[in-house]
Image: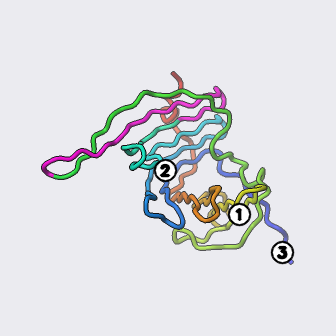
Amino acid sequence: MPAALTPPLLPPQWSSAYISYWTPMQEDDQVTSGYCWFDYARNICRIDGLFNPWSEKEHGHLLWMSEIGDARREHSRKQKVAYTRQAAPTGEQLQGTALADEVTPFHALFLPQAVLVDGAARHDGRHSVLGREADAWVIEPAGKPPSVFYLEAGGNRLLRMVTGNDPQHRSVRDFPNLSVGDIPDSVFASCAT
């Protein structure tokens, strides 16, 4: 019998575009995308993109947000833009309005480097994800549906994560072009103020 695989740590510094969607997709669900950066040595992350879930019908606008979460300084800075639909003779147009920045308490990164280790993830075989061979790692938190993290086979580059509290409606994030390496200070610069 082969030895049990040990869950890896995520790379110390990584960034990627992401695509956010749901499974199964329901009528009001949206597909959104953005970009994220994680620097575990500095204990900081940044996520830019259209917020999902966010009901345009309920709120009257789409919401773009850039959030820099700095766990060292224990605060998060959010910059937001609301996009509302405006009727025009040439067709519907989007009108962007900058909203007030928010600074809120922030104590831990959204996706910890040791998420698989700390969550006692178990290996659940190999799968094809985004056209690549991937190891599936399953975390089973008490009282919640399991979360599945798909990493490049034999490595630690995240390709997809499937999470959420509703077992019938899961949140999916794909990371199609994850890059490992130094992240320039300028990426987190607006957090320094």
Q: Residue at x 52, y 61 (%)?
A: 22
Per the model, the C-alpha gap separating discs 1 and 3 is 17 Å
**Does label 1 or label 3 sit earlier along the sequence?**
3
- Badge 1 marks a residue whose secondary structure is strand
In the figure, is residue 35 to the left or right of 1? left
Q: Is residue 30 above or below residue 74?
A: below
Near-viewer residue (89 or 3): 89
Q: Position of residue 12 (x, y in %)?
A: 65, 45
Identify the amino acid type marked 1: Trp
Residue 71 magenta-highlighted: yes
Question: Distance between the Cα atoms at labels 3 and 2?
Answer: 40 Å
Disc number placed over residue 57 in the picture, else none: none
- The residue furthest front is 58
In the image, which disc is placed on residue 52? 2
Q: Which mark is residue 2?
A: 3
Among the 4 quarters of the image, the one containing residue 31:
bottom left
Task: Please give the name of the residue rendered at 62% of the width and 64% of the height, measured from the top-left corner.
Answer: 152
Question: Identity of the amino acid at label 3?
Answer: Pro
Amino acid bearing label 2: Asn
**What span is in magenta?**
68-90
Foreground tag (2 vs 1) = 2
